[in-house]
Image: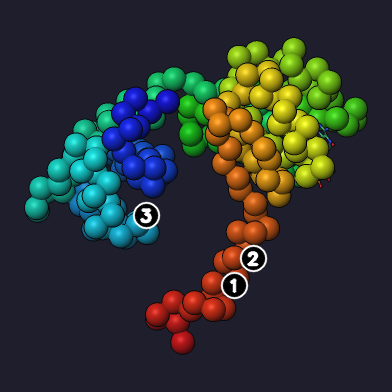
Amino acid sequence: MMSNQNKIPQATAKRLPLYYRFLNNLHIKGKSRVSSKELSEAMKVDSATIRRDFSYFGALGKKGYGYNVEYLLGFFRKTLDQDENTPVALIGVGNLGTAFLNYNFTKNNNTKIEVAFDADKRKVGKSIGDIEVHHIEDMEQNLGDISVAILTVPVSEAQNITDRLIKAGVTGILNFTPARITVPESVRVHHIDLAVELQSLVYFMKHYPLENEE
Ligand code: ATP
């Protein structure tokens, strides 16, 4: 997806969509330049990190001027392939899956769930947020050339569904199940366990209170 990804460190690449969204909002508001300090305060990323990240993008901020919003947006669009649509499949239309279908990443205009699957016959044939739910048995026939999937099935089903997705040509999985799924090296998995994230937040609040907290 990213043409020059070899040059950009992974931690920087992960912040790209965040930068893109924020700068796009500035652009819509008619702002043509922005300082690293403004960006830092709004995005909660420290300004040294922003300056280092932006230097990888070939953007050099000028003192008293800041960064050129248009230039950065052009770079992000090209790098993130914003002009190209990435269709996504969602597997498991439970509580979380349903929320994703309704939300459907409306702020990110280039990634969109286009098809959904579930094993529950009562859900099959229904449309949620304009997306039709197909039976999981028919997944392979309805995936088309989709290469990205969101996994919101029960943990016990995660590996089996993953194996099928990979066989069908999926190479990127956003895994919302607590399962640590096994995939070949050529498949990228990003794992988001909301329960763990929440627990870790509470743990950090307790054991590593922030400086200005009493
Ligand atoms: P709900 O309250 O609708 O059951 P949930 O998120 O609490 O949602 P889970 O048990 O986590 O329920 O299941 C998530 C969804 O995955 C459900 O809609 C379920 O029907 C579906 N599901 C279960 N097994 C499979 C499978 N093998 N393939 C596809 N979908 C499945």
Seen as rendered, the residue at the extreme left is 63
Residue position marked by numbered label 1 in the rendering: 203
Q: Mark 3 against mark 2, which lies toward the viewer?
A: 2
Seen as rendered, the residue at the extreme front is 185
Looking at the picture, how far across and down is residue 179, in whole percent? Answer: 72, 46
Question: Which amino acid does the dot numbered 3 rest on?
Answer: Met
| Label 3 neighbour load within 10 Å: few <14, some 14-19, many 20+ | some
Q: Helix, strand, or loop for circle 1?
A: helix
Question: How far apart are the alpha carbons under marks 1 and 2?
Answer: 6 Å
> Is residue 102 visible in this depiction of the protein?
no
Seen as rendered, the residue at the extreme bottom is 214
Residue position marked by numbered label 3 in the rendering: 43
The residue at the point 44 percent across, 20 percent down is: 84
Q: Helix, strand, or loop for circle 3?
A: helix
Q: Quadrant of ligand 1?
A: top right
Looking at the picture, how far across and down is residue 198, in whole percent? Answer: 62, 62
Question: Which amino acid does the dot numbered 2 rest on?
Answer: Gln
> Is residue 37 visible in this depiction of the protein?
yes
Q: Mark 1 against mark 3, which lies toward the viewer?
A: 1
Q: Do tag 1 and tag 2 residues touch (Cβ < 8 Å)?
A: yes
Of 163 and 51, which appears nearest the observer? 163
Residue position marked by numbered label 2 in the rendering: 199
To which quarter of the image does residue 98 belong? Answer: top right
- Residue 98 shown left or right of residue 193 in the figure: right
Question: How far apart are the alpha carbons under marks 1 and 3?
Answer: 23 Å
| Label 2 neighbour load within 10 Å: few <14, some 14-19, many 20+ | few
The residue at the point 33 percent across, 33 percent down is: 6
